[in-house]
Image: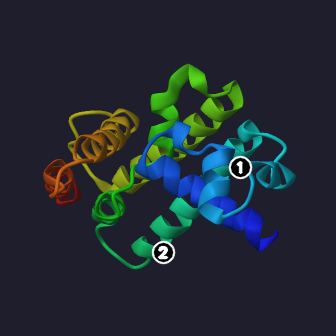
Amino acid sequence: MSDTRQQLKQIATEQIRRHTLHAASFREMGKVLGIKSSSVHYHFDNRDALLQELVSDYEHAFFAQLEARCAGVSSPLQQLAGLFIDSHQQQQQCLCLAFAAAGDETTAEQRQAVQRFLQRLEDWVADTLARAHLLPLARPELARVIVSSLEGALLLDRDQPQPLRLEATRQWLSTLTRL
């Protein structure tokens, strides 16, 4: 993959995670990189193809980072919460949250890719909860609550100097890992 193509993908990802899906226009990407928007078209057939690729790349990078953080630790849910807190510190939202918020502005394939990411994350959380007993909900439902709590807390803390909701969610998660 060319350096320019990789840089364009990085710019688009950062624009989306810092702002919204609309921030990743070919014109804006070209401006940031110092090239014409027509040159961006050389690297990507269209914006939808770029966005589809971004979701796939994000999923791969997210889970690679999560697995690396969890290697040999006894509190994987704390590590997951830490990833969300790191995003807050970088003033970024989850890329898939930005896609989900865009709703019908995304293609069916992009929505499916976001749903695959969320399902994979929920499955990871449910597997992590396998050793916990006396949970008030079945593991799949509790996994959905946990993922929703983290995503929602990141969104609500977005413009706040401190990630108070994320920290509260992390503390709540620590009570689950003691079961």
Amino acid type, residue under disc 1 in the picture: Glu
Q: Is residue 32 above or below residue 116?
A: below
In the depicted structure, whether residue 170 falls above or below residue 147: below
Q: Which residue is more in the foreground, 178 or 100?
A: 100
Q: Which residue is mark 2?
A: 68
Q: Quadrant of the N terminus?
A: bottom right
Residue 174 in view: yes
Residue 11, image x and y in percent?
Answer: 59, 59
75 sits left or right of 42 in the view? left
Foreground of the two, 90 or 133: 90
Q: Residues within 10 Å of mark 2 (few under 14, many from 20)?
A: few
**Of callouts 2 and 1, which one flags the residue occurring earlier in the amino acid sequence?**
1
Where is residue 127? Give x, y as percent: 44, 52
Q: Which residue is mark 1?
A: 53
Residue at 36%, 32% in the rendered image = 141
Element on which disc 1 rests: helix
Residue at the image point whose x is 64% and y is 51% from the top: 54
